[in-house]
Amino acid sequence: MSLSLRAASSLRIGLGLAAVGRPGYITLGRHTDLPAVRTAEALKERAFALMDAAYAQGVRYFDAARSYGLAETYLAQWLQARPDVTNIVVGSKWGYTYTADWRTQADVHEVKDHSTDAYDRQVAETRALLGDRLSLYQIHSVTPDSPALSDTALHERLAQLADEGVTVGLSTSGPNQADTIRAALSVTVSGRPLFGSVQTTYNLLERSPGGALAEAHDAGCAVIVKEALANGRLAEPHVVAPEMSALREITEQTGVSCDAVALAAVTAQPWADVVLSGAATVEQLASNLAAARLQLSPTQLERLTELTQSADVYWAHRSQLAWA
């Protein structure tokens, strides 16, 4: 089953709940973005405010995951409290289990498991919360060595979910995302492609999967971009390094924020169906959504390629970001 995310909203920006579903994450600036006391109720209030603001401004794709703490729970409760919200696409992911026990500092925040047992457990948990509102279910953070790409028993289970009307997809991570995407495109069940979506890290710093994402789009997959702001590295006040000068200059030219420029550069890619905002505040969300009204010139887009890093350099830096 293919998923037409562009048909859901012309805005082409969705809301990801990774930043507000749990007290700890690796995005920069969380010490000022979130309440000083990050109780489950406080983050629920913040998540509701973000979802209300996003929906009011035209966002129609909402993204959660089993490992995002209480993100699925918050999304389910928000949908129950907003019965008029019927025209949205709800996506979630399985493959990681949240293990931090509502702490910002933990030895292990999440545990990866792409086995059939993990899928059976987590799809039941997601279904119990989101029911038939679930439109898209993705394998979380697939890499080329993931058994999810070769496990035929798992493929059969996922195909059953697709037959029930839920689009099956995968998210990718690591320096070899392009290899993962191309491997996923070759997976079939009963002669039909299994995956109808791919969610991938792509931004001004990390462009390596762009060609593979274009291939996925051409093959009929919905393409969702995550971490378009590189976990906050492409947003104020973190755009200070000399190698970020092109972004600062174009921000001055356009009169919008750095994050809006960075997001607009991604929405300019013809293969990008939805680009996720990972906003933690309503103000950040409004700033992100300015990207939908910004059309960068070819000259500006070319200038922004100066920020590109090698995939190995980008992912090595990301691996050093601290949970906070």
Image (tube, helix red, strand yellow):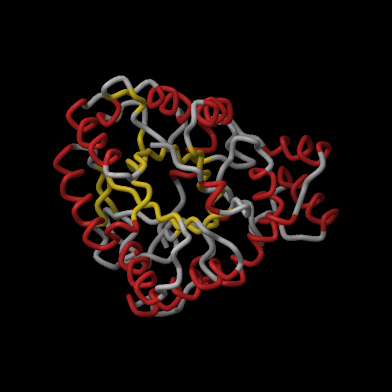
Q: Please tell me which residue is depicted at 51% across the width and 67% down the height of the picture.
A: 280
Q: Is residue 257 above or below residue 225?
A: below
Q: Position of residue 299 (x, y in %)?
A: 83, 37
Picture quarter containing residue 260? bottom right
**In the image, 112: left or right of 249?**
left
Q: Is residue 322 above or below residue 80?
A: above
**In the image, 85: left or right of 269?**
left
Q: Please tell me which residue is depicted at 57% across the width and 28% down the height of the picture.
A: 214
Q: Is residue 221 above or below residue 33?
A: above
Where, quadrant-wise, is the C terminus in this rendering?
Answer: bottom left
Residue at the left extreme, as displayed: 117
Report the number of numbered marks: 0
Q: Please tell me which residue is depicted at 74% across the width and 40% down the height of the picture.
A: 304
Camera-nearest residue between 123 and 134: 134
Q: Position of residue 186 (x, y in %)?
A: 38, 20
Q: Position of residue 82 (x, y in %)?
A: 42, 74
Camera-nearest residue between 229 and 46: 46
Picture quarter containing residue 139? top left
**In the image, 268: left or right of 133?**
right
Picture quarter containing residue 283? bottom right
Where, quadrant-wise, is the N terminus in this rendering?
Answer: top left
Q: Please tell me which residue is depicted at 16% across the width and 45% down the height of the picture.
A: 120
